[in-house]
Amino acid sequence: MKIVKLSLLTLCLTIGLFSCKKDDDSDDVITIEVRDRDEVQEEDILEIETYLANHYYNSSELEAIGDPSSSDLEISALANGETEAPEGHTILWDLLSESNPILTKETKTYANTTYEFYVLKLNAGGGEESPNFSDEVRVNYEGFLLDDDATIFDSAVNPVVFDLTSLIPGWRKVLPLFNTAVSFEDGGDGTVDYMNHGAGVMFIPSGLAYFSNGSTGISTYTPIAFKFDLMNAYVTDHDGDGIPSYLEDLNGDGEFTIADPDDDTVTHDDTDGDFTPNYFDADDDADGIATINELEPKTYTVDTNNGGTEPVLVANREFEISRTEEAGVITINTVTIMDSNNDGVDDYLDGEITINYNSSN
């Protein structure tokens, strides 16, 4: 498994996707009431379901394409008094059935709240990879409101790469449900054609979006939607410690949280209690030895000139951290997670173990 290292977590790259809000020059302080999340969720899911019941899409046209992109999707509102979609179109709500998995209702927990949301799968994606919640992804997208005008508040015409940990929660919940493209072709003119890539629409409540913060063009407590195309996914290692970030989600909730000094019953992702989650902590157990030095390093040399093939790494325990290629010779450096005393706690999380695998002594 190859890890893409990130030296810095970018928090605010684009307005529409990220949970960052631009400051203005006004001295006025606007107080926003922070409402109960469960109460808001009930309102949001009703608004989303009403939208799905009153909008249709160009189903026949998409079926004829076979490998559609989100840009091929056209969603239209039923006119007043209409109950049926025009010929060749299908009401979105009618896709919700066990026999037709195009539209699915998903349930995830976030901020101690059970959230329901809907995902329209135009194409699940034919590639073998599916992004983890903490990965980087290459996507096209268009964010729009669930209003009569389907107001677009943000979009990207050409594929862009985002770190899912920097996006609103909905992206971390939805993108892992899709696979990447099977392959791609360079068009030679600066464009790339991705074959059989993930494509869909997420209809998410405000609790998985901007909630009480709002954003440019988006009011507080507003459910929203995103069309998107998923091309590639890249496993990240935010702190460069050799452990893929998704494995540093200790409680497995798909989010990174730190210890709460007022509540020691909360399961969190900060082993040494230094208020830095493990995915961003180069010494996870604060034993004075960097995490990467508590992993066993290995180097593989593959001479492709003589028929050499790349090694098969052991799933979930050995990870590629770098590679170089020169004159047909590939050098691959990996690290393997170790539990030297077999106590069920990996060395890099076990403060009682101080083995430095990279030490020459």
Image (cartoon, grey):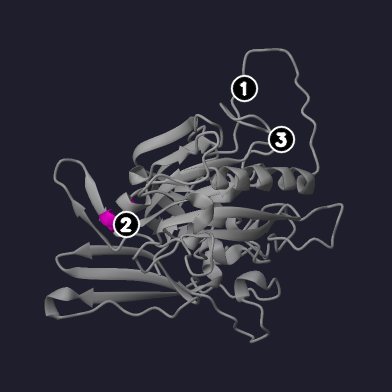
* Residue 156 horizontal side relative to residue 278, left or right: left
Instruction: Specify which label sits upstream in the sequence, 3 or 1.
Output: 1
Label 2 SS: helix
Q: Which amino acid does the dot numbered 1 rest on?
A: Asp
Question: Which quarter of the figure has residue 303?
Answer: bottom left
Look at the image and say whether residue 324 sits in the magenta stretch.
no
Q: Residue 33 carries which label?
A: none
Question: Which quarter of the figure has residue 155?
Answer: top left
Give the residues in magenta.
62-67
Query: Where's residue 73, x and y in %?
Result: 37, 45
Q: Which amino acid does the dot numbered 3 rest on?
A: Ser
Quarter holding the N terminus? bottom left
Nearer to us in this view, 125 or 46: 46
Question: Which quarter of the figure has residue 252?
Answer: bottom right
* Whether label 3 touches label 2, CB < 8 Å: no
Q: Identify the residue under disc 2.
A: 63
Label 1 SS: loop
How far is disc 3 from disc 1 in space, using C-alphas?
Answer: 16 Å
Query: Where's residue 288, x and y in %?
Result: 64, 63
Nearer to us in this view, 97 or 151: 97
The reply to whether residue 240 is in sight is no
Question: For the residue carrying disc 3, how many other residues have a C-alpha within 10 Å: few (<14), some (14-19), or many (20+)?
Answer: some
Instruction: Specify which label sits upstream in the sequence, 1 or 2.
Output: 1
Q: Which mark is residue 23?
A: 1
Label 3 SS: loop
How far is disc 3 from disc 2 in space, using C-alphas?
Answer: 39 Å
Q: Which amino acid does the dot numbered 2 rest on?
A: Glu
Q: Identify the residue under disc 3.
A: 212
Question: For the residue carrying disc 1, how many other residues have a C-alpha within 10 Å: few (<14), some (14-19), or many (20+)?
Answer: few
Query: Where's residue 338, x and y in %?
Result: 55, 79
Query: Where's residue 168, x and y in %?
Result: 58, 44
